[in-house]
Image (cartoon, rainbow, N blue to C red):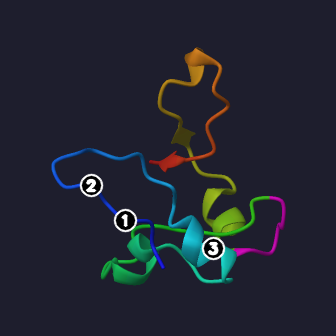
Amino acid sequence: DAPPHKSGTVEKCTFCKNLIDRGEVPACMQLCPGRARFWGDLDDPESEVSKAVAGREHTFLHEEAGTNPSVYYLS
């Protein structure tokens, strides 16, 4: 049920909105063998992603552009 891809084009990541709408996690989370990615509700302090971010240094890409990014790059 993913949207069709036009061959030879680049698309922005939608975090697999079609999967999220069904209550599933994005494909990158399902396929990452090293569990290098976290997904969840940052507003829930008990979620796996909130626990991963808590107390760790992180950066955002292009935060100065005012886009209010919500992808954390943990160090």
Disc number placed over residue 4 in the picture, else none: 1
Q: Which of 59 and 71 is in front in this view?
A: 71
- Which residue, given by chain and number where applicable, does mark 2 sit on? 6
Q: Nearer the viewer, residue 8 or 43?
A: 8
Q: In this view, does 26 lie to the left or right of 47?
A: left
Q: Where is residue 69 in the image (x, y as percent from the top left)?
A: 61, 37
Residue 45 covered by magenta stretch = yes
Which stretch is magenta? 43-47
- Where on the picture, by quarter, is residue 23? bottom right
Q: Residue at x 19, y 55 (%)?
A: 7
- Where on the picture, by quarter, is residue 27? bottom left
Image vertical order of residue 9 relative to residue 29, above or below: above
Q: Position of residue 36 (x, y in %)?
A: 39, 68
- Which residue, given by chain and number where applicable, does mark 3 sit on? 20
Q: Which residue is drawn at 57% across and 16% down?
A: 65
Q: Residue at x 41, y 46 (%)?
A: 12
Marks 1 and 3 close (CB-CB < 8 Å): no
Alpha carbon separation for disc pair 2 and 1:
7 Å
Which kind of residue does numbered mark 3 sit on? Ile
Q: Is mark 2 on a helix, strand or loop?
A: loop
Which kind of residue does numbered mark 2 sit on? Lys
Q: Position of residue 48 (x, y in %)?
A: 66, 75
Q: Is residue 46 left or right of residue 63?
A: right
Q: In this view, does 20 lie to the left or right of 31?
A: right
